[in-house]
């Protein structure tokens, strides 16, 4: 049976956590930009 | 005193759970009522004034799609199907990516549209519209009930709050702020909830990583359960495609997503949906991987549905339990409110106004809409009360139904020749055969079979009898749907 390598699994897990954290940051930045343009809603 | 270890299934004392419920419940209701002051007319209540920007648009799509099922089933998938199980769950985000261009087209073709039902009625006629509404209602109720049940189960497991009380409070909070604020309240609270979910998932995952060595987890799983790391795991691969098609069906057909496409400012919807897909994709892996560590940590998981909360609470103590509690509460609220709003829109616009009371004026419809939110909340509560079935059963039973709507919706948006009668039969046959496959073969095939049959019926019927559509007919003038509209108009 061929298994995912340890390196792939580590990258998958750590990469996912970093991506989720980046997502939160992106939302805050976008809200700030919308706010400055008066385009929140 | 809070308990930091798993004792039976309770990881927090009940009063801590009640405090958290009270704090967040009151916060959502106050915020909802505050933002809801903008909802002065029907369009404001149902579609937040059709002017939602990119940040709120992306956040609401992402938060709605992060359900309690995402937080609870992703670890379960990891526990049972390993790496591919988590990736299978992540594939549900592909629906958001594909809906991005569709949202752009929906906004352009139907600038005055209200619901997904409007599209099916204008595109395929009343028979297909009724079948579509039935599918949509069954699915929305299944989603609502699965989340109401999940709320009750998680609160009981984490804090010992009796199932019926936890479930009732969560539903009540969501009904109250949706009732007062409509889509303004839903989208506003969704933004705050999406930030809490993202930060909560990262915090729990990061803290678990500090306490366990990933290499050690890998070695243990590779030795004891190598199939979880297998590059080829047939059931997991099937579930990946099944989840993907289930996700397509859920997003393409449901008014939750259409109402957001109508609500976003022109030029925003496609970017918001694409971004929401990017934000959503890593969440099942980030929330699910901790289940793989259960063996290394020596944690016994009596109920796979509770794998995530149990592991977080065992490893992180009260902090983990509180974090999971808050994340699950936010993910529940962000989806329940959206479903209450979008499904009550369908009932208001399609059933009450266009099917039963075509003469009702806007003021009357505006008064009816909140009452339907209450009715929907009450129906959900009644169905949740007996606590029937497994979470995954409730969720996936509706899979073949919604998968049958993928092609009628997609073809209807892009293919002028799509046959209306074919769309009707695609939904009927896809749903019927898909349900038969669900019971005779397994849940992981039902959506695939339904979508494949629906596509075939759509293609063959259109090939045999192509229709010709004027796209402009989808931009329906106000009141043009009324039975006597043709007689009155010049």
Image (cartoon, coloured by chain):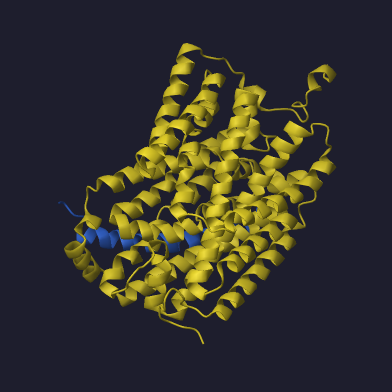
Chain colours: A blue, B yellow
Residue B47 found in image quarter: top right
Residue drawn at the location 40% of the way across and 71% of the way down: B310
Residue drawn at the location 72% of the way across and 48% of the way down: B372
Residue B63 found in image quarter: bottom right
Locate residue A30 relative to residue B304 in the image: left or right.
right
Residue drawn at the location 51% of the way across and 21% of the way down: B422
B426 or B104: nearer the eye?
Answer: B426
Residue drawn at the location 30% of the way across and 54% of the way down: B81
The image shows residue B473 at horizontal and vertical percentages of: 66, 22
Q: Quadrant of the C terminus of chain B?
A: top right
What is the residue that sits farthest to the left in this orientation?
A1
**Total marks in image:** 0
Can I make out residue B166 in this image? yes
Asked if residue B380 is positioned above or below residue A22 in the image, the reply reads above
The image shows residue B142 at horizontal and vertical percentages of: 54, 48
Can I make out residue A38 in this image? no
Residue A4 found in image quarter: bottom left
């Amino acid at each position: 049976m061929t298994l995912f390598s340890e390196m792939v699994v580590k990258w998958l897990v750590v990469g996912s956590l970093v991506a989720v954290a980046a997502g939160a940051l992106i939302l805050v930045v976008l809200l700030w930009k919308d706010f400055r343009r008066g385009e929140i809603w | 005193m809070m308990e930091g270890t798993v004792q039976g299934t309770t990881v927090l004392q009940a009063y801590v759970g009640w405090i958290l419920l009270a704090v967040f419940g009151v916060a959502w209701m106050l915020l909802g009522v505050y933002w809801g002051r903008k909802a002065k007319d029907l369009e404001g209540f149902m579609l937040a004034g059709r002017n939602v920007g990119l940040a709120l648009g992306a956040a609401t799509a992402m938060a709605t799609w992060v359900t309690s099922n995402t937080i609870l089933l992703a670890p379960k998938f990891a526990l049972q199907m390993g790496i591919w199980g988590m990736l299978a769950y992540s594939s549900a985000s592909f629906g958001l990516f594909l809906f991005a261009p569709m949202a752009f087209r929906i906004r352009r073709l139907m600038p005055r549209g209200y619901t997904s039902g409007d599209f099916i009625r204008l595109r395929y006629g009343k028979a297909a519209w009724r079948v579509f509404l039935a599918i949509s209602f069954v699915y929305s109720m299944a989603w609502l009930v699965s989340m109401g049940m999940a709320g009750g189960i998680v609160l009981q497991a984490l804090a010992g709050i009796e199932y019926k009380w936890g479930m009732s409070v969560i539903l009540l909070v969501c009904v109250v702020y949706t009732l007062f604020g409509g889509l303004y309240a839903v989208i506003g609270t969704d933004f705050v909830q999406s930030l809490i979910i993202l930060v909560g998932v990262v915090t729990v995952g990061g803290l678990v990583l500090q306490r366990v060595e990933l290499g050690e987890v890998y070695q243990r799983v590779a030795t004891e359960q190598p199939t979880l790391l297998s590059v080829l795991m047939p059931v997991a691969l099937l579930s990946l495609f099944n989840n993907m098609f289930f996700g397509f069906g859920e997003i393409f057909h449901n008014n939750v997503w259409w109402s957001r496409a109508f609500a976003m400012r022109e030029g925003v919807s496609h970017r918001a949906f694409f971004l929401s897909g990017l934000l959503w994709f890593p969440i099942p892996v980030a929330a699910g991987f901790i289940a793989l560590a259960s063996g290394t940590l020596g944690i016994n998981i009596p109920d796979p549905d509770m794998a995530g909360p149990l592991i977080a609470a065992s490893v992180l103590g009260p902090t983990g339990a509180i974090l999971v509690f808050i994340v699950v509460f936010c993910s529940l609220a962000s989806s329940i409110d959206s479903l209450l709003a979008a499904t009550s829109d369908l009932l208001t616009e399609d059933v009450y106004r266009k099917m039963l009371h075509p003469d009702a004026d806007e003021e009357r419809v505006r008064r009816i809409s909140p009452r339907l939110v209450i009715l929907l909340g009450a129906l959900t509560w009644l169905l949740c009360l007996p606590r029937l079935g497994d979470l995954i059963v409730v969720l996936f039973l509706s899979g073949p139904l919604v998968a049958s709507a993928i092609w009628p919706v997609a073809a209807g948006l892009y293919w002028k020749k799509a046959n209306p009668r074919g769309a009707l039969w695609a939904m009927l046959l896809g749903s019927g055969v898909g349900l038969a496959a669900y019971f005779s073969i397994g849940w992981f095939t039902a959506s695939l079979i339904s979508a494949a049959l629906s596509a075939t019926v759509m293609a063959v019927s259109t090939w045999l009898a192509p229709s010709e559509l004027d796209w402009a007919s989808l931009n329906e003038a106000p009141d043009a749907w009324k039975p006597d509209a043709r007689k009155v108009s010049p």
